[in-house]
Image (cartoon, rainbow, N blue to C red):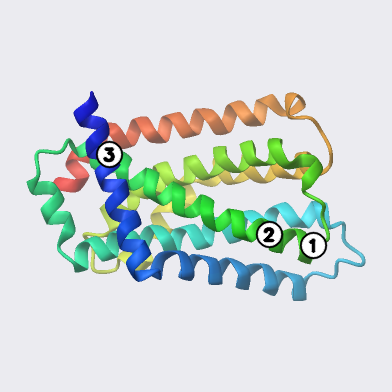
Amino acid sequence: MQTYFRQISAIVWKDFATELKTRELFSSMFVFAVLVIVIFIFTVDLSITNSSEVGPGVLWVAFFFAGTIGLNRSFMMEKENGCMQGLLLTPADRTAIYFGKMISNLAFLTIMEAFILPIFMIFFNIDLAPHFFPLILVIFLGSLGFCAIGTLLASLASNLKTRDIMLPILLYPLMVPIAIGSVRMTSKVLSGEPLADMMNWVGLTLCFDIIFIGAAVMTIDHVLEE
């Protein structure tokens, strides 16, 4: 088991070392997420619209769209540098490669979200401090499911010539339950409702997280060998 965790940590460390050297992944995700929020700010008239009703949808659109760029870019760099072939030639378990890439993608997405939340708070004039801990839990559950299925599909799409187009086509329909659950929970949290009153949405999102991770573990061998 220690060897398995060392394999996962080695892949995560490699991705962080690459990102620290290039800074391509985080910068592209952050700039895109900021652009999405700014575009919505100039589109929606917040003087006649409740920002706590519109804001959660805008926030998750920014997270998911920017996260898709990160997923695509992370596997594109592996292909361009021939790193994926090197990983497959090692004795590392295929699921360790999947979990290593998923943790890396989740970490980069979480860092981007940490920078985006203050910008969202300023533009939408919403005080996130009273809702900090339930909001963090909701964002983690939504981001985990997004990265679980997104990492699997990004590894599949990386073998295709039209990978930039195929990943959103494959990913977005499958993540609809997580997107709906995340937006609804965020809306309720920002409205001041306790997390205990939305356990049905928490359970739904958590179930999809587990299902997507389980499906990835069962299929990643075939996906990476193709």
Instruction: Name which quarter of the figure residue 139 lies in.
Output: top right
Q: CA distance from mark 3 to mark 2?
A: 33 Å
Residue type at the position of mark 2:
Val
Q: In the rendering, at what x and y percent does residue 189 appear?
A: 76, 39
Secondary structure beneath dot 3 equals: helix
Marks 1 & 2, CB-CB < 8 Å contact: yes
- Residue at the image point whose x is 48% and y is 57% from the top: 67
As drawn, the label of residue 58 is 2
Between 75 and 205, the one nearer to me in the picture: 75
Up the image or down, 9 lies above or below 117; here it is above
Residue type at the position of mark 1:
Phe
Between 65 and 4, the one nearer to me in the picture: 4
- Residue at the image point whose x is 58% and y is 54% from the top: 113
Secondary structure beneath dot 2 equals: helix
- Residue at the image point whose x is 72% and y is 41% from the top: 132
**Quarter of the image containing the N terminus?**
top left
As drawn, the label of residue 78 is none
Instruction: Name which quarter of the figure residue 140 lies in.
Output: top right
Circle 1 Cα neighbour tier, 10 Å, few/some/many (<14 / 14–19 / ≥20):
some
Q: In the rendering, at what x and y percent does residue 135 appear?
A: 69, 41
Residue 82 seen in this snapshot: yes
As drawn, the label of residue 8 is 3
Between 116 and 182, the one nearer to me in the picture: 116
